[in-house]
Amino acid sequence: MSAPFVRLFTQPNFVWTDIRKEEEAHPRHYLAHLLLLALIPAVCLFIGTTYVGWSLVENETVRLTTTSALQLCGLLYLSIIVGVVLMGLFIRWMSRTFDSRPNVNQCIGFAAYTVTPFFLAGIAGLYPSRWLAITVLGAASIYSTFLLFVGLPIFMHERREQGLLNAASLWGVGLLVLVTILVEMILLWSNYLRPEYLRVTGV
C-alpha cells in the first residue's frame, strides 16, 4: 500500500504536495494506484452478484450468471478508468488559467487520488443492497468532495479562494461525467448484452 494512499486518510491536508512532486519525478506514477484500486468495485460486485445475490421478494434470491456478471464488472472497470481520464483531461483544460500549469499525467493522477474513497466504497458490492450502497456511496462522495476542495488549491499552486471556485466547478463536471458514464454503461449492458438472471427460492 503506497504512502500517498494512506496519507489521503491520515494527512489529507498535506499529501497533495507530495503527490504532485511524485508525478513530476515519475510520470504515470498514478497508473498502479488507478488500475489496481479500480479493480475493487469490479471484483467485489462480481462476487456479490454471482455468489451472494439480492432479494426482490421474500424467500427468493436473484443472482447473475457468471457471463453476465463478467460483462457488467468489465464495463464498470472500463467506465471507472474512462471517467477518471476524462476528469483529468478536464482538469488540464481548466489549468490554462493557472500560474503553475500541471501536465496531463499530473491532472489524471489528481483525479485518480481524489476518487479513492469511491474505490474503497466498492467493497460494499460484496453484499448487494440498495440501502447499503446508498450509505457507502454517500460517505464516499462526502470524503471525495473534501479531498477535492482541500487538494485542488494545493495541487495547482493557486490562491485558496480561486482554488475553491475551481473545485466547485470541477465538482459539478465530475457529477455530470459520473452520471452520464454510469447511465450509458447500464443501458449498454441491459439492452445489448442481455443479462441473464438466476432465481433461487427458499434461500
Image (cartoon, grey):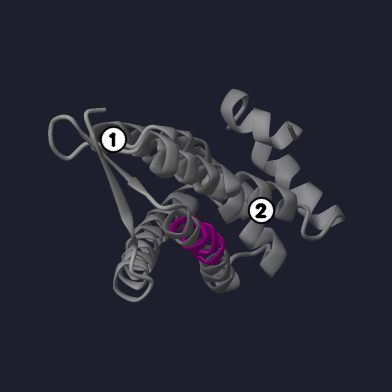
Whole-percent x, y for residue 68 in the image: 42, 59
The front one of 52 and 107 is 52
In the image, 152: left or right of 49? Answer: right
In which quadrant will I find the C terminus? Answer: top left
Helix, strand or loop for disc 2: helix
Whole-percent x, y for residue 191 in the image: 29, 73
Residue 22 versus residue 187 in the image, above or below: above
Query: Is residue 160 in sight in this rendering?
Result: yes
Residue 105 versus residue 191 in the image, above or below: above
Identify residue type, mark 2.
Leu
Confirm whether the magenta stretch covers residue 74. yes
Residue 109 versus residue 104 in the image, above or below: above
The front one of 132 and 82 is 132
Q: Find residue 133 and report its image quarter.
A: top left
Residue at 33% across, 59% down: 196
Q: Main secondary structure of the magenta part?
A: helix
- The residue segment tinted magenta is 72-84
Residue that numbered label 2 is attached to: 35
Residue that numbered label 1 is attached to: 129
Residue at 66% across, 29% down: 7
Residue at 54% across, 64% down: 78
In the rendered structure, find residue 144 and report the number of the disc placed on it.
Answer: none
Helix, strand or loop for disc 1: loop
